[in-house]
Image: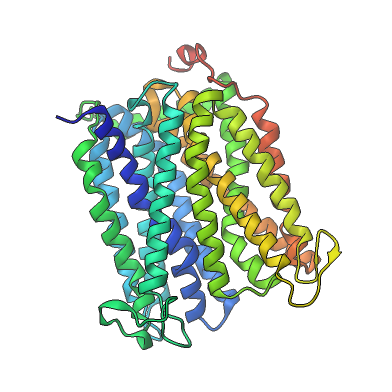
Amino acid sequence: MTTKRKRIWGWFFFDWASQPYNTLLLTFIFAPYIKELMADGAAAQSAWGFGIGTAGVVIALLAPVLGALADMSGNRMRWIWLFSGAYVVGSFALWWAAPGSFNLYVILVFFALGMIGMEFATIFTNSMLPDLGTKEEIGRISGNGWAFGYLGGLVSLVFMLAFLAENSETGKTLIGIDPIFGLDPQEREGTRAVGPLTAIWYAVFMIPFFLWVRDPKPPGAPPGAVKRALAEVLTTLRALPRTPSLFAYLGSSMFYRDALNGMYVFGGIYAAGVLEWSVVDTGIFGILAIIAGALFAWIGGFADSRFGPKPVITGSILVLTFVAISIIFVSRESVYGIPVASGSVLPDVTFYMFGAMIGAAGGIIQAASRSMMVRQANPERMAESFGLYALAGKATSFIAPLSIGVMTSWTQSQQLGVTPLVVLFLLGLFLLCWVKPNGDGASWQGSSD
């Protein structure tokens, strides 16, 4: 018999299993490796952005429809199985990104396939959150799940750096050994193993999820389900002005999540350019951010249960805005306008602290955002609502990178180039003023008709 405790732990394991796609592939290992392989850094960044952007468009267009279809037909587990397959195939295929002999476009297609699988599976697992506890419990459950996921990302990153990813010059891993399993450092097999590791990690750690999590909704799609699902999404979109709290929250989260993603994507590039960091420095930065994210996502879950998600999100946005402003005033020559001696570690220590703050506030805000979405969503259309949440997260995902690129080009300064993040965080905070802590409530009666 599957107990409530087992169901919750099974649900946690999705976060643990899927986090390496973000940690290893999107941020710290595979993306820098692709840039290493291509002589032209601008071309590599452009290709990477195109691949991720294309996947984002697919996710934005299909997420709400798939969510509505799952709400109508039930059997969310079937969709999770399907997109888990895409995750595993897409990530495993990255092994073939060999130096000098890989096809960039094929690799980007597989990367996008895995990313789409991850994002769509997340929609359906997130929509199961309200089935796991009461409204008072879901904040703590969401926070604990996010913390568990961060821990999975940390363990996978440490394992990758210590035993597999080789330095391009020495051929040794971070702890000074050859890549394990006899992998050839000359062919970058240790670093390329990040694809199979991510796929196998997911396949193994999703076992508890599939064993212990049950979908209470009965299966069976009605005739014309796809057409009806699309109609439901259009109806929901037209009805958004009649549910002002949900409308405001989708807009708010759209801006502050875009700003947070901008911090994640550009943090390493910024540190490398402004502070002249090495890959090892960036790896330490990532480990600190992940540890802080795991710890504070867990703490934030208790704060969410005690105070509700809105004040938790507000506090996190304020912290992230402070960091976005502060990093402008940190360079190799000065910290907050105070000159530092050549070779001083103060700029590095300060930026490490900012990394920990980004990880902490980022972990809290992502867990609380998931909890807040449960409170804002129509209980009868939970998967569709998380599809809209995914749409909001992807619809404007180009704003942060594009605005940073434009500002950097205009000012010729990496420091001034990140100022658009401040504006995006403040826009998110402004729209949050119209969000009701417990959603629109009775308004759903009218919007469902």
The colour mode here is rainbow
- The one of 48 and 233 positioned closer to us in this rendering: 48
Check the image and report above or below for 369 versus 272.
Answer: above
Residue 227, percent from left and from top: 33, 33
Question: What is the number of callouts on the image?
Answer: 0
Residue 409, percent from left and from top: 74, 67
Residue 21 in view, yes or no = no
Q: Which picture quadrant has residue 278?
A: bottom right
As drawn, which residue projects farthest toward the left? 1
Residue at position x 38%, y 70% in the image = 107
- The one of 353 and 376 positioned closer to us in this rendering: 353
- The one of 434 and 366 positioned closer to us in this rendering: 366
As drawn, which residue projects farthest toward the right? 338
Residue 198 in view, yes or no = yes
Residue 240, percent from left and from top: 54, 25
- The one of 129 and 82 positioned closer to us in this rendering: 129
